Image (spheres, coloured by chain):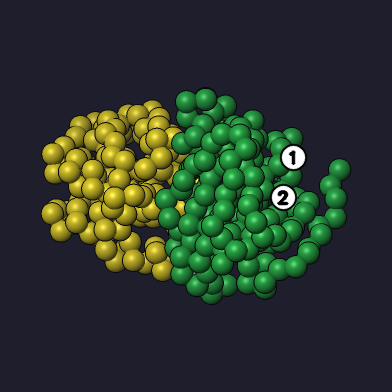
Chain colours: A yellow, B green
Amino acid sequence: MVHTTGGISIMAKILVTDDAAFMRMMLKDILTKAGHEVIEAENGLVAIEKYKSESPDLVTMDITMPEMDGISALKEIKAYDGNAAVIMASAMGQQAMVVDAIQAGAKDFIVKPFQGDRVTEAVKKVLG
Amino acid sequence: MYKDVVIVTVIEKYEEMLTLSFEAVKQVIPVPSKVVSVTSATGKIEINDISVMVGITGDLKGQILFLGDKSTFSSIGEALFGMPIGEEMLSSFVGELGNMLAGNVSIIASQKEINFDITPPTVIEGSKSNVSGYENSLISEIVLEEKGTLAIAFLYN
């Protein structure tokens, strides 16, 4: 992770987790334009593997995915690394789901569809 | 020009789902839209071009099927993301649109104390495919201004 003076921009390694290639492409586009490095995972299981092997600074996590859903993956990542920074990005934004995610340790919950600046603001806030 | 909404025969909570799904369309897709027909049926639904199916489980059980043609979905993608959706990404986009629409239906439904979860989407492509394996279907057709028609079908037993 690289910090510039004056806190103008922080380049982070971000793991984008979503089963839709289209959504991974959109998020990668938004985040690389914001100056970050992006790696991808297509489900919760791959996200856990990549979290352990790549040590990203932040994770974006979809919920509805095959193999392993995002809430389960969030819990496993947090169990592995209590300081893990995870932002949920999902269409499943019912209040109960948001509460579950935050209680499981997510830092923010973005409901799809979202605008690019919602993502970059959330990332900026979490990276602090 | 839009026709009047025609409601044939529906079961109340699934009828409400059609209303909620239209609300989701209005929230997710930023173009003027109107329901032009609502029908109930049994038997197979024919799919042309491309569609996406999402399972629902909880207070309601069944599938939601979103049907349209490729140009309609591509136009929706352009309206949402400001750029045309290329052929190689269209299937994935259609799956994700199904996910977003079904997810938003689940949010709106939960506010009315109808709670269900959704499965990952399944995209179906090809002309003249048929979907079967359920007893009932409720179908609404929604015209999206200058984009085309999106049909939403609830399939249940």
Query: Closer to us: mark 2 or mark 1?
Result: 2
SS assignment at label 1: loop
Amino acid type at image mark 2: Glu
Q: Is residue A34 visible?
A: no
What residue is shown at x 63% (from left), y 63% (from top)? B136
SS assignment at label 2: strand
What residue is shown at x 68% (from left), y 56% (from top)? B139
- From the viewer's perspective, tell me whether residue A108 is left or right of residue A56: right
From the top left corner, tell me how far across and down residue B13 is, in percent. Answer: 63, 72
Amino acid type at image mark 1: Glu
From the top left corner, tell me how far across and down residue A65 is, in percent. Answer: 36, 50
B76 versus A80 height, above or below: above
From the top left corner, tell me how far across and down residue A96 is, in percent. Answer: 41, 68
- Front residue (pair B123, A28): B123
Q: Number of marks in the image?
A: 2
Q: Can you identify the residue that label 1 sits on?
A: B145
Q: Which chain letter goes with mark 2?
A: B
Quadrant of image for the C terminus of chain B: bottom right
Quadrant assignment, res A29:
top left
From the top left corner, tell me how far across and down residue A22 is, in percent. Answer: 44, 35
Q: Which chain letter goes with mark 1?
A: B
What residue is shown at x 13% (from left), y 39% (from top)? A53
Q: Which mark is residue B141?
A: 2
